[in-house]
Image (cartoon, rainbow, N blue to C red):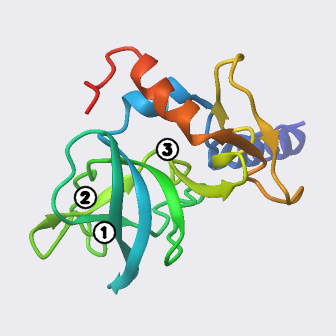
Amino acid sequence: MRRYSITVGVILVAIASSLALQAKVARMSYFALVATSDLILVGSDSSVETVGQWKVAHFTVEEVVKGRPPAEVQYLASPTWDCDIASAKLGERVLLFLRLPIPRTAPGAPPADLRNNLVYEISFAGRGRMPVDTTEDGQDVQIPTGDIELPEDVPTSSGSDPRSTLGRRVPLSILRNLVYQAPNPPQPR
């Protein structure tokens, strides 16, 4: 009986620890993404540099949707944990949601500033970086499927690649207008 109890105990501990160690990103509403972002910008990645083990992207701003960006916008383009999808793609035009860096003091931690400029972080574990495509109908933003909840009345269309995790497309103009409909919206520029 004792051996059975120990075996069951070991199995339960193994199951519990494996469940506790699974990293997972919860869904977030578009309005929550807006509220938790310090900057919302449209533009493109102009360069990417490596700082230690981290990649830092330099961003050329075309339009400010929310916030007051510094003269030079740079952001962490490397994941900081398992479910983080932070990245940059040279020349890619994106709608970018950024937040101020989290202060980290551990050795090897990502940089919070570079040459006296803040290194922002992409909001919502990298999901706040959304490619913008120009189509014959205008400009569409590719939204991560399943991670960001849009209001029900927002029209979406399917992406061209069914294997992509960026499966929904929404007109940039609609997403921009939703920023100003969010609770505590930024003042229009």
Are the residues tagged 1 and 3 within 8 Å (C-beta)?
no
Residue 70 visible: yes
Who's the residue at 56% across and 49% down the image? 127
Residue type at mark 3? Phe
**Relative vertical location of residue 46 with respect to residue 143 in this rendering, above or below:** below
Residue at the far front in the pictured view: 136
Who's the residue at 12% across and 76% down the image? 115
Who's the residue at 26% across and 48% down the image? 100
Q: Quadrant of the C terminus?
A: top left
The location of residue 5, given as percent across then percent down, is 83, 37
Q: CA distance from mark 1 to mark 3?
A: 19 Å
Q: Quadrant of the N terminus?
A: top right
Disc 2 crowd, CA 10 A, few/some/many (<14, 14-19, 20+): few
Q: CA distance from mark 2 to mark 3?
A: 18 Å
Residue at the far left in the pictured view: 116
Circle 1 — which element? Answer: loop
Q: Earlier in the sequence, mark 1 or mark 3?
A: 1
Q: Which residue is mark 1?
A: 109
Q: CA distance from mark 1 to mark 2?
A: 6 Å
Q: Which residue is mark 3?
A: 124
Q: Quadrant of residue 187?
A: top left
The location of residue 39, given as percent across then percent down, is 31, 44
Residue type at mark 1? Ala
Q: Nearer the viewer, mark 2 or mark 3?
A: 3
Circle 2 — which element? Answer: loop
Q: What's the mark number on residue 82? A: none
Tell which of 38 and 172 is nearer to you: 172
